[in-house]
Amino acid sequence: MSTKRKLITEDGQEYIGYGFGSDANRVCELVFNTSMAGYQEIVSDPSYTYQAIVMSYPLIGNYGMAEDDYESEFLSAGALIVHEYNDIPSNFRSINTLSEVMEKYDVPGIYGIDTRKLVRFIRSYGSCKALITDESTSKEEGLKILGSTSIPTDAVSKVSCTNAWKSRVVMGSDPIQRSKPMTVKKKHIVAIDCGMKKNIVSSLNAMGLDVTIVPWNTGVEAIKKLHPDGIFVSNGPGNPEDVPETIATIKKLIGEYPIFGICLGHQLISLAYGAKTYKLKFGHRGGNHPVKNLLTGKIEITSQNHSYAVNMDSVKDTPLEVTHMNILDNTIEGVRCVNDRVMSVQYHPESAPGPRDGSYLFNEFVKLFQ
């Protein structure tokens, strides 16, 4: 039988369950995800760095872990919290159990708790700090640890690449990107890696783009020496204001190249134009968020994972035009500046996991080169 483990929230609630993965004690930001599938992509998404993910879907682990479905080379999530964990997966593609992979990368997990109650708490109280610890830790001890421990602000530097690398188009290969790729004549872009998911790189390659991925703090001159046709700014974890170096770089690149940003990249581009960002009460995480495309009037069901959003009033004083809106809470989901050939969205068009409604955006990025 698994060892009993405990979750203590910063307001003093205690949840006792059983451990899987690593047995490390960890202070994390408590968030929830409403996706019904895709736990491998979720737990390997760098945007979850320092966060304890509560899965609202009750059964996790039942299809194991497949070699081709990771979104990063290593797991950086703080913890995983589920109602029921299955350690005997049924899937011909599985090569490891979820617990084995989490143990390898020192990610603790808890199962056997009331995740419905925990999700409702997060929705009411908001994202907060929580401690994953041994059952023997008292509430008083746990609250003392939570009060004296801060969530680190170095998340982007922790998950970004440390050296530039390339991902080239392989002609004749079967692209991972699901939408029909456009025919382009050997374009090359630079992707600023703030914690980029693998399927974003695959999606860009599928559009006929060779990609040079560079670290988050790469300077403007180093980027220009690569002679890109365009710039991509990736997703990533944490507060966008924690990476002023990247914002400064984007400011200098605006107007020089076509630019496309996703998630954190969307927030960084907005900040570079002078807009403001703010933290949402409990964020958007899941594969079922409805977004209205203001340019077409169509509704897209989207995959999302973020804690911050762009302030609507602050955009009015910038050259940016709002292109997408979240139907649930009227937050900004996309902006553009036609004159500068800049576009960005808050959600994940590469859809890993999630619906594929937004995959057309990679085509729109390619059109900026024309």
Image: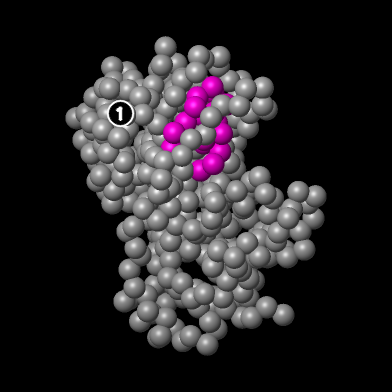
Q: Amino acid at mark 1?
A: Lys
Asked if 48 appears above or below 219 in the picture, the reply is: below
Residue extent of the magenta highlight: 197-213
Task: Pick whichever, 337 or 206, lies toward us.
Answer: 206
**In the shown orientation, is residue 129 left or right of residue 22?**
left
Query: Going 63% across and 62% down the picture, which residue do you hit?
Result: 101
Residue 219 visible in image: yes
**In the shown orientation, is residue 156 left or right of residue 39?**
left
Asked if 237 appears above or below 265 in the picture, the reply is: below
| Residue tagged 1 | 224
Q: Quadrant of the C terminus?
A: top left
Query: Going 72% across and 64% down the picture, which residue do you hit?
Result: 86
Q: Secondary structure at mark 1?
A: helix
Q: Quadrant of the N terminus?
A: bottom right
Residue 31 visible in image: no
Picture coordinates of residue 65, whole percent (x, y): 68, 54
Q: Residues within 10 Å of mark 1 (few under 14, many from 20)?
A: some
Picture coordinates of residue 21, whole percent (x, y): 61, 69
Q: How is the image coloured?
A: one colour
Task: Pick whichever, 285 or 363, lies toward us.
Answer: 363
Query: Going 46% across and 39% down the picture, which residue do you hit?
Result: 165
**In the shown orientation, is residue 214 left or right of residue 208?**
left
Task: Pick whichever, 257 or 19, lies toward us.
Answer: 257
